[in-house]
Amino acid sequence: MPTFNQIGITQIKPLHRASCHCGGVVLELALPRGVEDPRRCNCSICRRRGAICASVPLSGLRVVQGEDLLTLYQFNTHTARHYFCKICGVYTHHLRRSDPGVFAYNVGCLEGVNPFDLGEVPCSDGIHHVSDRKQGGALQ
């Protein structure tokens, strides 16, 4: 699991801010060990949004501005909760289906971070998500 305490020229702070494109939504992320386990995903929504995500515990993400500007999108099992700024449309974070004890956040929203500086980023197999696999004719 790769960890980045610095991405490009940006030092990742223990409490780092993230924001959408218009600046209406601002998050504060507890990143004491930096950006941990950055990844892409090949599920239907992630393929379309193209973001690099990393995770923080639920207690490690706080909306400090613009909670009223966040809009929620859910699909399929309606377990994951994907949040977007309703003004600029940028995906900021989501409650993960595979681990509801953590949020995934958009690394590209971290202030001062260029996600392309991460280089090659591993891809999770969201197409074959464990919650979508049939066992004995029924969803697990």
Image (cartoon, rainbow, N blue to C red):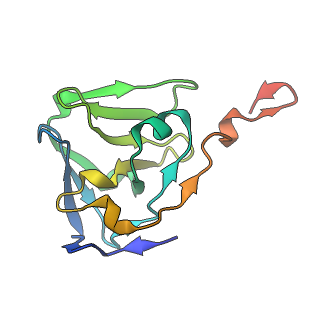
Question: Image point 39% across, 47% down: which residue?
Answer: 51
64 to 3, vertically: above or below: above
Image: 118 above or below 41: below
Residue 3 higher or lower than 42, as above or below: below
Q: Quadrant of the C terminus?
A: top right
Drawn side of residue 120 relative to residue 106, left or right: right
Tell me the residue at 30%/71% (across/down). Answer: 32
Q: Position of residue 24 (x, y in %)?
A: 12, 37
In percent of the image, x 40 and y 53: which residue is there? 52
Question: Residue at horizontal 53%, vertical 39%?
Answer: 97
In the picture shown, does residue 98 fall above or below 110? above
Question: Residue 75 vs residue 60: left or right?
Answer: right
Task: Give the tally of numbered discs.
Answer: 0
Residue 111 x, y percent position in the rendering? 18, 58
Pick the residue in front: 127 or 55: 127
Residue 37, position as x, y percentages in the image: 47, 64
Q: Position of residue 114 (x, y in %)?
A: 26, 61
Q: Residue furthest right?
A: 136
